[in-house]
Image (cartoon, rainbow, N blue to C red):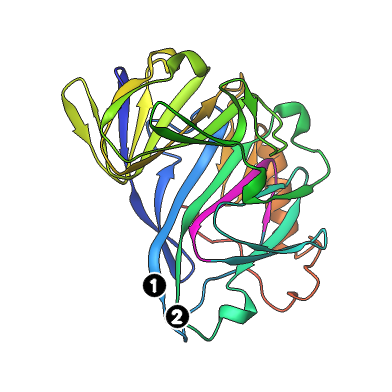
Amino acid sequence: MSNINLIIEERAASIGKFMVGRLLPFREKRMVGPFIFIDHMGPVKLNERENFDVLPHPHIGLSTLTFLFEGSIMHRDTLGNAVEIKPGAVNWMTAGNGIVHSERTPEHLRHSDKHMRGLQIWVALPKELEQMKPEFFHIDAAQIPAWSEGGLEFKLIAGEAFGRKSAVPVYSRLFMIEIKSTERQTVNIGHELYGEAGLYILEGGIESEGDNYHPKQLLVAKDSNLCEFTIEANSTIYIFGGEPFPEERFIDWNFVASDKEIINQAKQKWIAQAFDKIKGDEAEFVPYPALNKK
């Protein structure tokens, strides 16, 4: 990327008993386009006594995008959905005015060794849709646009780019693109992008203006229209972003909104346990943290 404005290193963060690499939000860059939160989960190996269990917790004002590289997660929510997420598929849950979900190791894997790796992403909603009714969509891997061009392998995980449109039903102008290459070559896709853009290196690396960048780095562009770089052999990268919103977004724990009062109301509602319960997962929940460090 010939116009790198900011380099964000993964920072270790805990989600219960599970450690992740946090990319967004960052103190110098709270959002990239409408993307407001990104965690890199894993890679981690869990034995037959260890499981991935994120207890029921609420969201408002955002859509979650779960994309796995390895492993499997059972998603349950207060709309009645119970779906196993597998590598390459997309879980797209829009919280709107409020939803509760849990993410756990599926029952058929709980007593065996397993691996886990993926991205957990939050996309803020436009102001006029922050209070919409919650929705949930599961998009199988086969429904994600994938193509080869000039020795590069592309997937359009969400949004619009390259004259294509993902099946993920997003609510603002955005893109999330996977690019893989088995050989070192130049990539120039700036003319396909718009708004703000970030580039996350999962494997391999890139070179830009004589500088080398490596896994666990998120590079934020000054201008998405100037997105040109050299990708190293055996690399996998993700480019994401889109049109930013005119209004500021606030984050408090799992709540996102353009109005702090909306967040405070959701906070009090969760503390009072007035959100709906997940059928079949009613016994446990994540309490609102006394000290919010996010």
Count the numbered circles shown: 2
* Residue 256: percent from left, percent from top: 63, 41
Label 2 neighbourhood size at 10 Å, few (<14), some (14-19), many (20+)? few
Residue 294 in sight: no
Q: Are marks 2 and 1 in contact (CB under 8 Å)?
A: yes
Q: Which type of secondary structure does the marked residue at label 2 adopt? A: loop
Residue 70 higher or lower than 95, as above or below = below
Name the outermost residue toward the left.
Answer: 210
**Residue at 60% from the left image edge and 46% from the top image edge:** 65
Q: Which residue is mark 1?
A: 45
Name the residue type under label 1: Lys
Label whose residue precedes the other's in the sequence (2 or 1):
1
Name the residue type under label 2: Asp
* Residue 151: percent from left, percent from top: 38, 31
Magenta span: 58-71
Q: Tell me the distance, in whole angstroms, between the alpha carbons under discs 2 and 1.
A: 7 Å
Q: Which type of secondary structure does the marked residue at label 1 adopt? A: strand
Nearest to the observer: residue 261 or residue 5: 5
* Residue 63: percent from left, percent from top: 66, 43
Q: Which residue is mark 2?
A: 113
